[in-house]
Image (cartoon, rainbow, N blue to C red):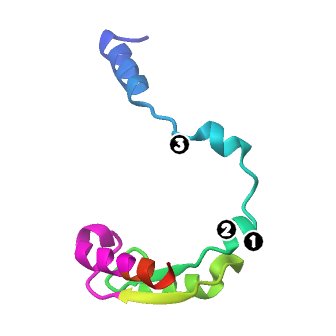
Amino acid sequence: MSSPIHRMDITLGKSLLRVGSTFVEDLQVQKPFSEDRYGSVRKVYIICKQDKTIPEEFQRKMVENGGGRPVDEVREIDGADHMAMLSAPDHVVDCIANVAEMYH
């Protein structure tokens, strides 16, 4: 039992679907991550001090556990919530630029 509106909703929904990556074919032929292909990249974790979604204590535990991939440095942005790029965009840009300069 479908109404014209229902069919239009389905058509609209299908038209809005997007493939998750524009490089799916490239990703399918890539080798898995390895120490050489990922582990050698320097990692910096930014603690968002006002994050209510992932509290600071849990963020620090994530850094400690690291999934076998330790971080090189931990930085903090006071005033940044879970969406730091929206709540403290200037601080995020400064932090990223400083990290890029430091590890370049």
Residue 6 placement (x, y as % from top left): 35, 17
59 relative to 94 in the view: left or right: right
Total labels drawn: 3
Residue 76 placement (x, y as % from top left): 38, 88
Q: What stretch is highlighted in magenta?
A: 77-97
In the rendered view, tell whether residue 95 sits above or below residue 36: below
Nearest to N terminus: mark 2 or mark 3:
3
The residue shown at (72%, 61%) is: 33
Per the rendering, the mark at residue 21 is 3
* Camera-nearest residue between 81 and 2: 81
**In which image quadrant can residue 15 be found?**
top left
In the rendered view, tell whether residue 51 sits above or below residue 75: above
In the rendered view, tell whether residue 72 sits above or below residue 13: below
Per the rendering, the mark at residue 38 is 2
* Camera-nearest residue between 39 and 100: 100
8 relative to 87 in the view: left or right: right
Q: Between marks 2 and 1, how big is the CA–CA gap? A: 5 Å
Q: Residues within 10 Å of mark 3 (few under 14, many from 20)?
A: few
Instruction: Look at label 1 and name its amino acid.
Output: Glu
The residue shown at (73%, 43%) is: 29
In the rendered view, tell whether residue 96 sits above or below residue 23: below
Disc 1: which residue: 35
Instruction: Look at label 2 and name its amino acid.
Output: Tyr
Nearest to N terminus: mark 1 or mark 3:
3
Residue 97 placement (x, y as % from top left): 36, 77
Asked if labels 1 and 2 touch by Cβ distance under 8 angstroms, the answer is: yes
